[in-house]
Amino acid sequence: MSEDQFHYESIGVIRTPFESPDGMPIQPAGSDNVEGTVEVDESYAEGLRDLDGFSHCILLYHFHAGTEIASLEVEPFLDEETRGVFATRAPQRPNQIGLSVVKVDSVTDHEVIVRGIDVVDQTPLLDIKPFVPDFDVPDNADTGWINASKSTIQSKQADERFL
């Protein structure tokens, strides 16, 4: 397949209290009480039917704020050592796609109220998927180099590496 066969369009926008990446939590685990609103374009509203039966959902979105410079080696937030970008959650990715697992508080018409949001306000939404532990949490998963940094995930905020 050639690159021109891939084209994604926003299906909505994610609204949050974070005007910029500066000081924003780096993962949903660090933003448990932060509320956001996922506004789906009305033409996609019917797709939200039955989402309210799930406690969590996965948001896929476009990193629109900050650098668009992709790097194959980055210094991740939880480490001081340079790592391969595909072994991190760093935003400096070749395709600028982000992923967050958030708590679903409510679903109405074309909006989803969520908690645990860690994205910049006005982030373009690409997709929503239900979070299903039986599908999404494999048994005996290893977390590589992140094991050493686990205790700091909830307290970390974005810094100049995100900008």
Image (cartoon, rainbow, N blue to C red):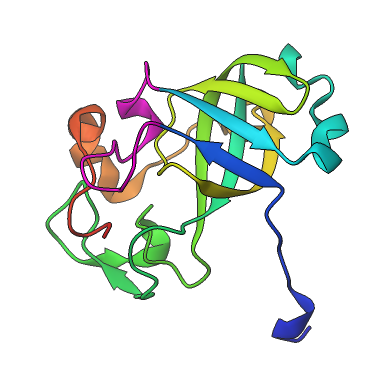
Chief secondary structure of the magenta span? loop
Figure quadrant of residue 47: top right
Q: Is residue 26 above or below residue 113?
A: below
Residue 139 location (% of width, % of height): 54, 30
Question: Does residue 162 appear in this view?
Answer: yes
Horizontally, is 53 left or right of 87 in the view? right
Figure quadrant of residue 7: bottom right
User: Was residue 48 drawn as part of the magenta stretch in this picture?
Assistant: no
Instruction: Give the residue displayed 26% in from the left and 64% down from the top.
Output: 83
Horizontally, is 2 left or right of 39 in the view? right
Q: Nearer the viewer, residue 145 or 110?
A: 110
User: Was residue 20 drawn as part of the magenta stretch in this picture?
Assistant: yes
On-image quarter of the N terminus: bottom right
Q: Nearer the viewer, residue 6 or 43?
A: 43
Q: Which residues are magenta?
A: 17-34
Figure quadrant of residue 150: top left
Q: Is residue 121 above or below residue 35?
A: below
Horizontally, is 93 left or right of 38 in the view? left
Give the farthest residue toward the bottom. Answer: 2
On-image quarter of the C terminus: bottom left
